[in-house]
Image (cartoon, grey):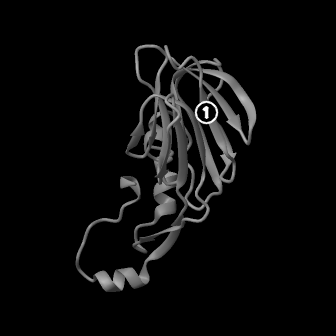
Amino acid sequence: MGFLMNDYADDDLLQRISAAQETVLRPLMMQATGVDGQVSESLAINEVSLLRQTKQSAHIEIKINGHSKIETLVGDGVMVATPAGSTAYNLSAHGPVIPLGSEILALTPISPFRPRRWRGAIIPAHAEVTFVVKNHQKRSVSATADNTEIRDVEQVIIKQAKQIKIRALYDAKHNLEDRIINEQFS
């Protein structure tokens, strides 16, 4: 969220808070099932990513709302980014910058090899994304929700945590919309 941060200043703090613009952020819920069957849950404000753990490329099936969209993504991994996270790791992986308040998520491959022409997708924020790791014995994959990593996963389900709202306040002179537009042209 560093890109979204206000400039630090103690002066006139109460006045700045009362004049601040509010944005609501909705985190993602990651439910990761390990190869040992253990289920772990974690929240992500920025993104949930799956990454290969070895020199072997990851082989990952991608399902949206239970329907297989890519049978086998071959590459370093894949991520689902929120609008708040779209200017971070997602942007570095050539994913789109998404304006805050948008009801969409970025589904972005990380160094994809196959399918050759697939560069990601924009999906509705209410969609449920399931990643199934194929051949996890040979091609182990970790899942990370912001900074919480679960190693050796075989399936990861990601959906918006609709019951959680994070209120972020921005200085009125810290025009977030302009910064997001400018980031796309820098």
Query: For this view, does 89 lie left or right of residue 117?
Result: left
58, above or below 184, in the image = above
Give x and y (percent) for residue 78. 54, 32
Q: Nearer the viewer, residue 12 or 71?
A: 71
Give residue 42's position: percent from left, percent from top.
47, 50
Seen in the picture, residue 104 relative to 20 is either above or below; the reply is above
Q: Position of residue 143 (x, y in %)?
A: 47, 36
Answer above or below: position of 176 versus 61. below
Give left or right: position of 67 versus 96.
right
Amino acid type of the residue that numbered disc 1 sits on in the rendered structure: Phe
> On the image, which quarter does residue 157 sit in?
top right
Q: Residue at x 23, y 76 (%)?
A: 10
Q: Residue furthest left?
A: 10
Across and down, in percent, residue 27 comes to 52, 56
**Would you say residue 82 is visible in this rendering?**
no
Which quadrant would residue 6 be assigned to in this image?
bottom left
| Quadrant of the rendering where the N terminus is positioned | bottom left
Query: Which residue is at the front of the view, 73 or 179?
Result: 73
Locate residue 151 relative to residue 124 in the image: left or right.
Answer: left
SS at badge 1: strand
The residue wearing badge 1 is 131
**Quarter occupied by the C terminus:** top left
Q: Quadrant of residue 54?
A: top left
Rate crowding at label 1 as few (under 14), some (14 to 19) or many (20 or more) other CA atoms within 10 Å: many
Residue 117 appears in the rendering = yes
Farthest right residue in view: 67
Residue found 52% across the figure and 61% down from its top = 177
Q: Is residue 150 left or right of residue 68?
A: left
